[in-house]
Amino acid sequence: MLRIFLTVSVLFWNQLAAQNAVDKVLDLCEEVDCFKPIFVIQSGSYDVMKFKSHQWVETEVSGMDMEHALEVGLGKLFTYLYFNNSAGTIVPTAAPWGVLGSLENGTMQQSFVVYRLLLPEIEIVPEPLDDTVEVERRPDVWFYVRAFDGEADEDEIENRVVQFQKDLKQDNQNFGELFRIALYNTRGLMYIAFEKTDEPEN
């Protein structure tokens, strides 16, 4: 009985912490340019969120861990965003920024797509001058999302991704292979997400 109580207690506090992190993201998006969901379905220890059509700039980085991939990738994207583009102008961005990656046998593969989201108001996006940088656009999309608030090293983040993937499989959810880490500040406020591959029931 004690073990059951402790397990339920841990699940409750984990769920509460995740919801607090979601609330912090939504509050942040009221104050700064920020990409936020247009629909949220609260579901236990993670949420299902719909995001509207959006565009971003990205670059692929391989052969290094996530921390160094972010450093290298964001450096390339910064160069594009600040004048090194076909218009020679500043391209405005919105939070979050982050990486897309994959897992193999419970381990992050050292190949990432580093991205920055662009403001939705931009109608014509300048072309990159660096052929390793690309501008992408995608339609409305649903994600399974688990939120976190607090600094974590790469091993902790990897554990979070692995555990989230296990939880989705245990719940028989349909989701894509790639994980997405969305960073909303430099103090560990983040979403970890897997794309939902079937439509939610109405």
Image (cartoon, helix red, strand yellow):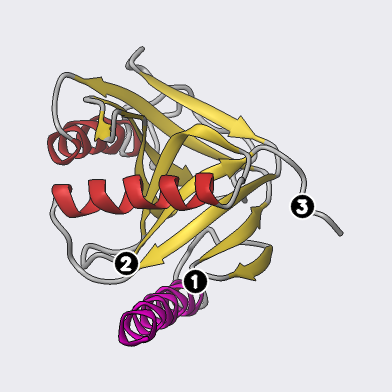
Q: Quadrant of residue 195?
A: top right
Question: Is 166 on the left-hand or right-hand side of 136?
Answer: left
What residue is drawn where x is 61% and y is 68%? 43
- Residue with the mark numbered 2: 189
Q: Is residue 50 above or below residue 2?
A: above
Mark drawn on residue 29:
1
Residue 145 is marked as: none
Secondary structure of the residue carrying numbered label 1: loop
Figure quadrant of residue 57 = top left
Q: Which tag, 1 or 3, sits closer to the chain's start?
A: 1
Residue 113 x, y percent position in the rendering: 35, 29
Asked if marks 1 and 3 touch (Cβ < 8 Å), the reply is: no
Mark 2 → mark 1, Cα distance in angstroms? 12 Å
Which dot marks residue 200? Answer: 3
Dot 2 or dot 3, earlier in sequence: 2
Numbered disc in front, either 1 or 3: 3
Query: What predominant SS class does the magenta segment belong to?
Result: helix
Q: Residue furthest front?
A: 1
Query: Is 8 or 34 nearer to us in this picture?
Result: 8
Q: Which residues are magenta?
A: 1-27
Q: Residue placed at 28% from the left, 35% from the top?
A: 106
- Measuring from the top left, give residue 143's x and y in whole percent: 58, 49
The residue that appears at 52% across and 49% down in the rendered structure is 170
The amino acid type, in three-letter code, at marker 3 is Pro
Identify which amino acid the numbered label 1 is placed on.
Cys
Q: Residue furthest right?
A: 202
Residue 183, relative to residue 43: is it above or below? above
